[in-house]
Amino acid sequence: MRFLFSLLLLLCSTAAVAKSVVDITGQKVIIPDHPQRIILGESRMLYTLALIVPGNPAARIAGWPGDMAKYDAQSWRQFTAAFPTINAVPQLGAGALRDLNPEQLLTLKPDLIILPRLAKSGAQEAHFRQLMQQVNIPVIYVDLRVDLLNNTVPSLKILGEVFDQPQRAQAFIDFYQQHMAQVRDRLARYHGAKTRVMLHLHLGRRDSCCTTAVNGNLGQLLAFAGGDNIAAGAVKGVFGEINPEQALARRPQVYIATGMADADNDKTLQLGPQIAADQAAASLQRLLAAQPALSQLEAVKNQRAWGLWHNFYLSPWHVVAVEVFAKALYPQLFADLDPQRTLEQLYQRFLPLTLSGTFWSQLPQ
């Protein structure tokens, strides 16, 4: 009790006007009308904030974990070069909820905490929410990484309301829905066989083969794009494993790997900002050649193997990944689809950054 009381003394008592929002879990939460000291549960929410917050997207952020700097050094360098004050935002651990130190967090005097909905949650998360409730700090959830098809648009609306940018949020929602509908509607008119596909997360990052996604995350987007995921029968949750023997037996026609390594890391798939196209293609070719079982896949032998920037999975930028999936799975049906143009429009219309790098690559012929 003494600990909680001392923490309460650290908080500023305010008479700010409040408003209510319904977060992605369905909870009605009272928050400040114009929160100014916001804690994010992961710094890679910056991808999404940059779509809807003009100027420096971290201007109202009082603290966050260091996950973007750790897992996406290229994007971190881009954002901090454009907005150097981002470097001054206090980092609260390496990136997981378990790393958030409540005492350190509360010394930052937050008026709102925004947490990501994760594929798994536990007692530690419940304890954290309870502690925040005791010190009267509102906590809301958004989902930009699990149930993407159902929760992306509501999460954008929530963030638009929190950051006083409902019109900018709606402008991106319109863009997003238009591009998603183009894929959905064309597939609705297609009556041919579905393309069998293998999704392999983090190529080269783990010794075992192969981590995949099915019921959520990139697996959900792959199904939306018409893919017949070879792991669908074996994996019941969002993420799971399939072994090389299973992959070979199910004969995927298309193979898609994800990665996000920067130019200095040749052990995993090099994709994302500041990665040249030839470097990305060579990285994919080198890593597949190093895994004999993957090299024997029909998809790889037929050069229908692709690499995709892994961090598409936790922001609405994934609309581009959907187009990449659709074109990889059904190249004739989507011959006129141009994911590169979509990515360029996303940057030009909504982001305060200049597009650079390579975000997907096909195995060279």
Image (cartoon, grey):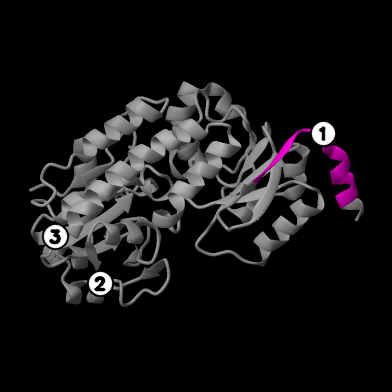
Magenta stretch containing residue 14, yes or no? yes
Residue labelled with disc 2: 244
- Tell me the residue at 59%/43% (across/down): 65
Find numbered disc 2 in the image and state the secondary structure of the residue it sits on.
helix
- Tell me the residue at 73%/38% (across/down): 18
Q: Nearer the viewer, residue 282 or 157?
A: 157
Number of marks: 3
Q: Residues within 10 Å of mark 3 (few under 14, many from 20)?
A: few
Query: Which span of residues is magenta-colored?
Result: 4-20
The image shows residue 257, relative to residue 262, as above or below, that is below
From the top left corner, tell me how far across and down residue 193 is, in percent. Answer: 12, 67
Q: Nearer the viewer, residue 107 or 280?
A: 107
- Tell me the residue at 77%/33% (across/down): 16
Q: Residues within 10 Å of mark 1 (few under 14, many from 20)?
A: few
Instruction: Give residue 14's mark.
Output: 1
The image shows residue 18, relative to residue 41, as above or below, that is above
